[in-house]
Image: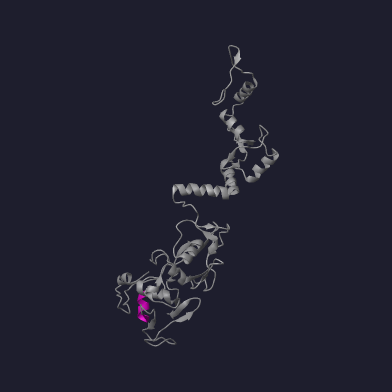
């Protein structure tokens, strides 16, 4: 927030009620010309006239017209100006580069300490008190409503926020963007959440406080990330699987389903369904492909997929292995076959 420390750079102390304008030229009306026509009170934000103008106030009288859309405006040298911009020009010698914020939410308060550029209102992290000054929040519906006008095209009483491509709702407070769920948490509990919030119903637009929860695991630590990833894979299995198919093989879930149905849900080699498990669940058949042409050949069970992989996809070696398995290799010593004897057996 701009206060005494910054104003002191312009020759203003906390006890002064006005400011002698330094000379500086800008586009439109200049600071010099503004100071010739009007006097500005830093604490009240009131402008009074120094020169009698036809049809306007007399010397020493307050000037300006208030409109709900533009705030205070005044006509100077035949042009109409927003008076919060005139206040900025009067004090700082330049036109504001962005739409000015009214820090207390009162569009009628033109005191210089109440004006700031977005992103330059140095106030530390957004507080619950400040949030409640500018927004109301319905904890049941999750809807934020503006209590002030944050911009010319936004009215008091309108719903706050915009939906971004990532699915989250963003609300800009004092020139800084926040996700709606973080603001809801701050509004209710007086602090920002220390980790990404979960939407219990999966709907990122549902900002009702009952729909928001901290994840069980803290993803900021290695252990927490691993636990979170395991939980995510279990609760979003279909999403993770579809992403994995795209990433590893460049195919969609629909292509996989087509292959699975064509093979009647069994391995293309052994003609048996998958029996291997992961985390207590039967695994899906693996996507098999030629490592030379990169063409997908079919779906295999874990055993067959591992087997041909260990044989380096070498057809000659695989045929030799088949011949080896089919051949009687019984080893005899002194005419007696040799058997495996497991521990604990006679």
Above/below status of 167 relative to 80? above
- Residue 58 magenta-drawn? no
Q: Quadrant of residue 324?
A: top right
Relative to 178, 279 lies left or right: right
Q: Residue 315, image x and y in percent?
A: 61, 26
Split into 4 quadrants, where in the image is the N terminus?
bottom left
Q: Residue 187, image x and y in percent?
A: 47, 66
Front residue of 277/16: it is: 277
Identify the image's colour scheme: rainbow, by chain, secondary structure or one colour: one colour
Q: Quadrant of residue 256?
A: top right
Relative to 270, 292 lies left or right: left
- For the record, the magenta segment spans 31-40
Q: Is residue 88 visible?
A: no
Q: Residue 193, image x and y in percent?
A: 46, 59
Residue located 66% across and 37% down the image: 273
Above/below status of 251 relative to 42? above
Q: Quadrant of residue 17?
A: bottom left
Q: Residue 213, image x and y in percent?
A: 51, 58
Split into 4 quadrants, where in the image is the C terminus?
top right
Front residue of 253/292: it is: 253
- The kind of secondary structure the magenta stretch mainly shows is helix
Above/below status of 284 relative to 23? above
Front residue of 122/48: it is: 122
The outermost residue toward the top is 334
Above/below status of 164 relative to 33? above
């Amino acid at each position: 927030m701009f206060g005494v420390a910054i104003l002191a750079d312009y020759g203003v102390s906390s006890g002064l009620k006005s400011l002698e304008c330094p000379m500086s030229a800008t586009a439109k009306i200049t600071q010099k010309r503004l100071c010739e026509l009007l006097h500005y009170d830093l604490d009240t934000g009131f402008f009074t006239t120094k020169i009698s103008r036809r049809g306007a106030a007399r010397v020493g009288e307050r000037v300006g017209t208030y409109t709900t859309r533009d705030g205070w405006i005044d006509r100077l040298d035949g042009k109409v100006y927003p008076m919060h911009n005139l206040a900025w020009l009067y004090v700082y010698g330049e036109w504001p580069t962005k739409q000015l914020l009214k820090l207390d939410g009162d569009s009628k308060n033109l005191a210089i300490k109440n004006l700031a550029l977005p992103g330059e209102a140095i106030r530390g992290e957004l507080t619950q008190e400040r949030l409640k000054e500018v927004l109301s929040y319905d904890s049941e519906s999750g809807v934020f409503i503006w209590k002030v006008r944050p911009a010319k095209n936004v009215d008091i009483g309108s719903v706050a926020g915009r939906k971004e491509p990532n699915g989250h709702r963003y609300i800009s407070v004092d020139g800084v963007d926040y996700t709606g769920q973080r603001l809801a948490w701050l509004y209710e509990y007086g602090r920002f959440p220390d980790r990404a919030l979960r939407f219990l119903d999966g709907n990122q637009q549902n900002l009702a406080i009952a729909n928001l929860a901290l994840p069980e695991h803290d993803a900021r630590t290695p252990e927490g990330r691993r636990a979170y990833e395991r939980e995510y894979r279990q609760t979003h299995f279909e999403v993770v699987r579809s992403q994995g198919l795209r990433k590893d093989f460049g195919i969609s879930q629909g292509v996989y389903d087509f292959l699975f149905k064509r093979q009647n849900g069994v391995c293309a080699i052994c003609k048996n369904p998958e029996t291997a498990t992961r985390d207590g669940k039967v695994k899906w058949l693996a996507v098999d492909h030629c490592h030379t042409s990169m063409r997908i050949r079919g779906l295999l069970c874990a055993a067959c997929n591992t087997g041909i992989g260990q044989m380096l996809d070498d057809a000659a070696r695989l045929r030799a292995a088949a011949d080896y398995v089919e051949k009687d290799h019984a080893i005899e010593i002194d005419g007696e076959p040799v058997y495996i004897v497991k521990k604990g057996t006679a």
